[in-house]
Image (cartoon, rainbow, N blue to C red):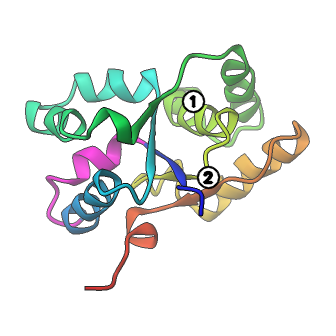
Amino acid sequence: MKTPRIYLDTSVFGGCFDEEFAKESLRLIEEIKAGRFMLLISKAVVAEVDRAPAVVQQVLADIPEDCIERLAPEPAVQVLMQAYLDARIVGPASATDAEHIAVATVARADMIVSWNFKHIVHYEKIEGYLSVNRQLRYGAIGIYSPKEVVDHED
């Protein structure tokens, strides 16, 4: 079976230190380290993590490199991100959220995982992103919270 390739936005790394989100965030990071998922990382995520507190930076630093696929910038990402903005899925102030979706889509990730319920993991936003993806002939991409992705078996 193919290892699912997942794109985490920065909220998952920060979620490791939030009482409400820590359990599933930490579990997802452990599942990545165990090889259940291949983590896709973009320059946008790296830049955001670099501006985060040191403990958040350490979460990413502790993931073995063989569990990470670092995504190179692609011109198609800017085109797709602009299409999301033109469709008013999110406004210009949330362009980085649109960029996360575009990077993961262009990279053909199996899913995007985020705690951002306002601009990413929201039924209207998801349908908007998927609609633009269909129009531009990109495949569907799953958009979930960590709670929906982690193994709940103990």
Quarter placement of the C terminus:
bottom left
Image check: 114 left or right of 11?
right
- Examine the structure image and report whether residue 62 is included in the region drawn in magenta: no
Q: x, y (%) of residue 23? A: 21, 68
Residue at x 32% of width, y 60% of height? 31
Residue at the (61%, 45%) spot, across then down: 109
What is the three-letter code of the residue carrying label 1? Glu
Magenta run includes residue 16: yes
Highlighted range, magenta: 9-20
Quick check: 78 left or right of 140?
left
Query: Which is more toward the observer, 147 or 126?
Result: 147
Q: Position of residue 16 (x, y in %)?
A: 19, 53
Residue 84 spot, x, y in % from top left: 71, 35
Specify the label residue 85 is tagged with: none
Secondary structure beneath dot 2 equals loop
Quarter of the figure with residue 124: bottom right
Q: Quadrant of the N terminus?
A: bottom right
Q: Identify the element where label 1 is drawn.
A: helix
Q: Check disc 2 and give the amino acid type.
A: Asp
Q: Is residue 3 left or right of residue 149?
A: right
Earlier sequence position, callout 1 versus callout 2: 1
Q: How many residues crowd around disc 2 within 10 Å: few (fewer than 14), some, or many (20 or more)?
A: many
Q: Distance between the residues labelled 1 and 2?
A: 16 Å
Relative to 145, does residue 148 appear above or below in the rendering? below
Count of residue discs = 2
Residue 51 placement: quadrant: top left
Please give the residue where the numbered disc 1 appears in the rendered image: 99
In the foreground, 21 or 43: 43
Please give left or right for residue 8 compared with residue 25 in the image: right
Residue where numbered disc 2 is placed: 110
Along the viewing direction, whichever of 87 and 140 lies nearer the viewer: 140
Kindly give the residue lying farthest to the front in the view shown. 1
